[in-house]
Amino acid sequence: MSDNCIIALSGVNKRYLMGNSIVQALKDIDLEVRRSDFLAIMGPSGSGKSTLMNILGLLDRPNEGSYLLDDREVGTLDDNDRSRVRNRTIGFIFQNFNLLQRTTALRNVMLPLTYRRLSDDERNKRALVSLGMVGLKDRADHQPMQLSGGEQQRVAIARALVGEPLVVLADEPTGNLDSKTGMGIIEILSNLAKSGKAVITVTHDPTVAKHADHVISMLDGNIRSYS
């Protein structure tokens, strides 16, 4: 891994069995992501971008190849170790927010801390700090249905940040938002990268790509360009 590199993929392949056919979802992927990178992954449906994100997020395993995360080989970890690394190292942001509708913003943000050995007061404190980072500390007691789409996405970002991850993975983070609200989310993601986190997003939004430090274009399981 080069200096300041947080993610290094080398020769990563991923295949799926679909019926009687084998689908090659990723083909010999080599990729390095540094701290403070804001990286956008683009490509048509079936290009492999979601499979790549699932592997980066330790939600799936490569068939071949190496995945170093913070200098540790994680591609071959067992399920328990993968869960621990994922919980402590990676924050997830989803297009549909994935918030629990019948609980408060504060409780939603506290969820990733459930399995940490922390007191209730410490979890509460960290969640409030995280909500403050996205400008929603005053909305801590609101349920998702009482928040706008942009506010819900900011709660989702606060939830991704509460565990102090090294890497933030965002799946179409502006996909359900209007352009003005989406621009606010892009600004938050850009600032996260500037603070030292690696931010990686799958997106169809050219505005996200415009503000990213690097753009990966994928097609048929290959990285066709990196700019």
Image (cartoon, helix red, strand yellow):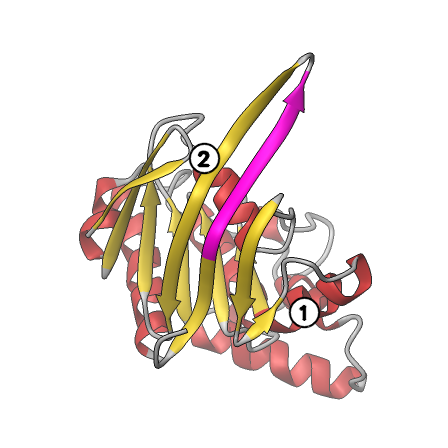
146 displayed left or right of 135: right
- At which x and y percent is residue 18? 65, 18
Q: Which residues are magenta?
A: 10-18
Q: Quadrant of the N terminus?
A: bottom left
Instruction: Assess whether residue 14 is covered by the magenta stretch.
Output: yes
Instruction: Assess whether residue 95 is covered by the magenta stretch.
Output: no
Amino acid type, label 1: Val
Gap in Å between the C-alphas at discs 2 and 1?
23 Å
66 displayed left or right of 119: left
Predominant SS of the magenta segment? strand
Q: Residue at x 75, y 87 (%)?
A: 121
Q: Which residue is under mark 2? A: 48
Q: Report the front residue among 142 and 153.
A: 153
Q: Is residue 135 visible?
A: no
- At which x and y percent is residue 25? 51, 32
- Element under disc 2: loop
Q: Residue at x 52, y 42 (%)?
A: 13
Q: Report the front residue among 168 and 56.
A: 56
Residue 85 circle label = 1
